[in-house]
């Protein structure tokens, strides 16, 4: 018992933080319909501001006031007024992309604003971590733990009093119950949404400042992973109950530390499972908690109206003549691009452009999944990793040529994709996004750590192939191989789009009920597309790995999956060209910004651009490039007709 | 020879509400039957039970003598049940022609992924012919290539009808095709339905409030009220039945 307690007590502060963030998630989801994945980033920002104020010698109460009491709600207010209030009635996909954009853009903005690199040992929020106040079951409780628990208890008590006894709390509960009715009763739901954003951002900020000292240094990624625990807590409350969310968060923190105590130390399971526990719990909750499943099967957001139709694609407004011209133009550009790469472009840039083309294959998988079938996946990087490691291990152990390995990589990734999709697709929408997020984190924290897969940080090597007399070792030769694989994958996606499956997907995206009423099996079709998409991502991963010659688990981490979604959504998720343009944009921007001579603070500009790009997605779902193309083509078209009229 | 559709003893509850209580009805091959009753009588629930959108707690649905219990919607569609929806369910982002084309391909059941991959997934000439014929039959040629969002409600209903008809279902379930239409559109719809009835041999089960439209299309009717069948038989008899008049118009003072 004593041992149990001594294992469990260190988990309490973690639990408190999970609970606070989880309650923030539930609060904003209920009152504004947005599942705010950016709370992790907001927690990071408050921790960063608190750190900076302390470093400047401010007293703690002043730093706390600026970072948590004023700064955090202010950030929430800005996000709500500037973005989230406009996406309330949009489809789940748009809301998710907007939140992902914020998740990526917010740390980038503050990275540019506070450019100094390493921040070690962030200060405690209140009591000193080096002072031990008392012992519980032989376990020393230091000031950090004590202040976390006490502050959380105070906030929880305050919240509960507010919800039961104040006008504002009552209104929030009412809005969560039925936003429409509340409007009729003369309450401004928009205003209530705004205050709930400020309140939940405050919770996020508080959680961030409390947790920062535990991490030991300030890294945005830590806070992003923290969010998954909060999501698991929110799931425990079925995304609607604050008390259950609170309880879920606390329990999760306790169990995490208990596992750490009882599992043999040094084994991958204990070093991997402990941080991965929230994702396991989340997956289990999603799949097996019947109430939650029923709730999400209905798949209606509290505020979502009827999904508006997707914006007309540029293709739709082009007349056939212009279409032919643009098709010929694209072909010509592609030829010029390939010829240039083989002749005058420098070796270093040929390598970069090969990277872009390999990434374009991975992005293509998102065009198929999100653009053509309206589903979302937050684990495409994990599928790419599965492909890369499959090809690498096959080459290392069975001497399989990479050319064969790429194909097998695609098949294995597709199989893994199908396994992920089978249970998750019953859920759909937001639940699917969260399940894929959990899977991605499981993959990079556990599965990719074993030596038979990704071999963790040290990674594995993937040889470049030789085909008879043709040797793909050189960068230019490998570039050709990348282009061929990309062209094949584009061929597959285009063939699917123009064929039966493409029409079925379009129908399914329009109305699942009507699609079933004409004999389309929605489940089979979704699993098929999810598996195909995973397979394409796997092929892309294998090509990318072979290009790099050696890859590790870090090359396919979950943050990258999120960035992928945002990048493709920014550039154009509805067209095949969009994937290629996204690959080019991402790699070229990345290379230019990280090249020597560019100030290091600018490295964050990449994230900022695509984070803001995700906001553009809310307005122009067809993507930035398609939007510009349409403007240009419309102008050309108008000039053409004017000329005809004049003639 | 069993009837085309045989619903026997179906009951369905939603929480404490009895949506359907021991409902039975039959539709013969090629027959047009009206299903009428006041709002909330359970008509759409019955449609959902027949097409597989919901499962009844009790009772069976048979199509051509075959039990359909627990078959999902798409399997029943392949067995020959086509339907339209009271609230339009169209494929946003697709043109009218695409709506018909996807249904046409589905009815033939020969769309395969490997055919797509071999570049053989495009529309074939006979499919294009079928689609054009259907567009003509429903007078939709003018809007054939218009995006579905630009259509009027009446045209949308016609597209739903065409999408179901092009599959040549044995049984067509029409859920309030005239709701939201003005009287002129409604009369046009009756014309189209009659023309369809005259040239094809689908059986029709029609839910409808517009008695003119019902009279124009069906010969026999079943009346539901509070989830129970309160009358059935030839349309004129049913309409003059005092119980039906009470259900629709309320208790005479």
Image: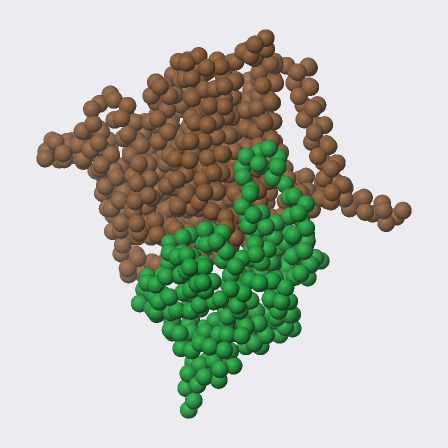
Residue B125: which quarter of the image?
top right
Point out the residue furthest to the top here. A469
Up-down relation of residue B128 to residue B34 (above or below): above
B107 vs A18, left or right, is: right
Chain identifier, green in the render: B
Q: What colour do you see for chain A? A: brown
Q: Residue at x 50, y 48 (%)?
A: A520
Give the camera-side residue of A41 and A363.
Answer: A363
B233 vs B165, left or right, is: left
* Quadrant that contains the N terminus of chain A: top left
Q: Residue at x 30, y 27 (%)?
A: A272
A114 vs A504, left or right, is: left
Give the camera-side residue of A622 and A390.
Answer: A390
Give the camera-side residue of B192 and A505.
Answer: B192
Q: Is residue A545 visible?
A: no
Residue A203: % across, % down: 34, 45
Residue A434: % across, % down: 39, 41
Residue A5: % across, % down: 14, 35
- Here the colouring is by chain
Point out the residue furthest to the left here. A1
Residue B48: % across, % down: 43, 61
């Amino acid at each position: 018992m004593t041992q149990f307690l001594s294992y469990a007590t260190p988990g309490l502060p973690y639990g408190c933080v999970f609970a606070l963030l989880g309650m923030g998630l539930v609060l904003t989801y209920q009152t504004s319909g947005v599942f705010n994945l950016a709370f992790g980033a907001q927690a990071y920002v408050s921790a960063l501001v608190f750190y900076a104020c302390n470093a400047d010698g401010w007293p703690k109460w002043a730093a706390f006031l600026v970072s948590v009491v004023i700064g955090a709600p202010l950030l929430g207010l800005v996000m709500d007024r500037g973005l989230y209030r406009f996406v309330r009635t949009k489809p789940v996909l748009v809301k998710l992309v907007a939140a992902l954009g914020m998740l990526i853009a917010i740390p980038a903005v503050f990275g540019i604003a506070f450019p100094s690199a390493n921040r070690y040992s962030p200060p405690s929020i209140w009591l000193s971590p080096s002072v031990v106040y008392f012992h519980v079951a032989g376990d020393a409780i230091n000031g950090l733990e004590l202040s976390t628990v006490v502050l959380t208890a105070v906030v929880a008590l305050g919240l509960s009093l507010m919800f039961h006894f104040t006008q504002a709390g009552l209104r929030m509960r009412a809005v969560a119950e039925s936003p429409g009715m509340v409007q009729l009763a003369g309450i401004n739901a928009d205003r209530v949404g705004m205050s709930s954003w400020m309140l939940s951002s405050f919770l996020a900020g508080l959680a961030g400042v409390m947790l920062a000292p535990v991490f030991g240094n300030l890294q945005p990624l830590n806070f992003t992973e923290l969010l998954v625990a909060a999501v698991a807590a929110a799931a425990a409350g079925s995304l609607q109950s604050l008390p259950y969310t609170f309880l879920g968060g606390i329990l999760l923190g306790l169990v995490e530390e208990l596992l750490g105590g009882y599992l043999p130390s040094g084994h991958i399971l204990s070093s991997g499972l402990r941080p991965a526990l929230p994702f396991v719990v989340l997956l289990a909750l999603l799949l097996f908690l019947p109430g939650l499943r029923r709730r999400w099967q209905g798949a209606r957001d509290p505020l979502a109206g009827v999904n508006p139709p997707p914006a007309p694609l540029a293709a739709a407004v082009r007349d056939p003549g212009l279409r032919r011209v643009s098709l010929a133009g694209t072909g010509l550009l592609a030829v010029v691009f390939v010829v240039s790469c083989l002749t005058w472009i420098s070796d270093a840039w040929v390598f970069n452009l090969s990277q872009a083309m390999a990434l374009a294959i991975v992005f293509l998988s998102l065009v198929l999944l999100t653009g053509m079938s309206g589903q979302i996946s937050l684990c495409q990087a994990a599928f790419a990793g599965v492909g890369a490691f499959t090809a690498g291990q096959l080459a290392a152990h069975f001497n399989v040529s990479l050319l064969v390995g790429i194909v097998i990589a695609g098949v294995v990734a597709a199989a893994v994709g199908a396994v992920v999709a089978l249970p998750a697709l019953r859920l759909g929408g937001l639940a699917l996004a969260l399940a894929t997020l959990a899977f991605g984190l499981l993959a990079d924290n556990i599965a990719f750590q074993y030596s038979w897969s990704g071999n963790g940080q040290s990674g594995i090597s993937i040889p470049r192939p030789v085909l008879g007399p043709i040797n793909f070792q050189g960068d230019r030769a490998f570039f050709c191989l990348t282009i061929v694989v990309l062209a094949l994958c584009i061929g597959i996606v285009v063939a699917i789009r123009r064929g039966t499956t493409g029409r079925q997907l379009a129908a399914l995206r329009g109305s699942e009920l009507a699609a079933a009423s004409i004999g389309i099996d929605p489940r089979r079709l979704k699993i098929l597309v999810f598996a195909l998409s995973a397979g394409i991502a796997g092929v892309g991963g294998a090509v990318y790995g072979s290009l790099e010659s050696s890859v590790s688990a870090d090359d396919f981490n979950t943050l990258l999956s999120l960035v992928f979604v945002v990048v493709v959504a920014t550039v154009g998720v509805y067209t095949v060209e969009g994937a290629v343009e996204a690959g080019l944009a991402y790699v070229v921007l990345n290379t230019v910004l990280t090249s020597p001579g560019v100030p290091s603070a600018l490295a964050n500009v990449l994230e900022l651009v695509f984070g803001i790009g995700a906001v553009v997605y809310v307005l122009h779902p067809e993507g930035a490039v398609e939007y510009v193309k349409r403007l240009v083509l419309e102008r050309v078209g108008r000039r053409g007709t004017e000329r005809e009229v004049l003639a | 020879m069993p009837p085309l559709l045989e619903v026997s003893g179906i009951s369905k509850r939603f929480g404490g509400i009895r949506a359907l209580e021991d409902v039975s009805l039959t539709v013969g091959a090629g027959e047009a039957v009206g299903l009428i009753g006041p709002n909330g009588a359970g008509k759409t629930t019955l449609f959902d039970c027949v097409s597989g959108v919901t499962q009844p707690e009790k009772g069976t649905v048979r199509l051509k003598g075959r039990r359909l219990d627990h078959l999902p919607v798409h399997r029943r569609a392949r067995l020959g049940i086509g339907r339209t929806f009271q609230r339009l369910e169209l494929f946003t982002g697709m043109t009218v022609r695409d709506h018909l084309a996807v249904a046409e391909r589905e009815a033939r059941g020969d769309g395969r992924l490997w055919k797509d991959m071999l570049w053989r997934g495009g529309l074939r000439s006979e499919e294009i012919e079928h689609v054009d014929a259907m567009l003509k039959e429903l007078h939709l040629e003018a809007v054939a290539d218009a995006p579905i969002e630009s259509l009027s409600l009446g045209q949308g209903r016609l597209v739903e009808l065409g999408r179901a008809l092009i599959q040549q279902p044995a049984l067509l379930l029409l859920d309030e095709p005239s709701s939201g239409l003005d009287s002129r559109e409604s009369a046009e719809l009756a014309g189209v339905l009659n023309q369809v009835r005259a040239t094809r041999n689908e059986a029709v089960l029609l839910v409808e409030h517009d008695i003119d439209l019902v009279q124009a299309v069906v010969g026999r009717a079943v009346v539901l009220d509070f989830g129970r069948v309160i009358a059935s038989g030839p349309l004129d008899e049913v309409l003059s039945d005092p119980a039906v008049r009470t259900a629709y118009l309320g208790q005479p003072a």
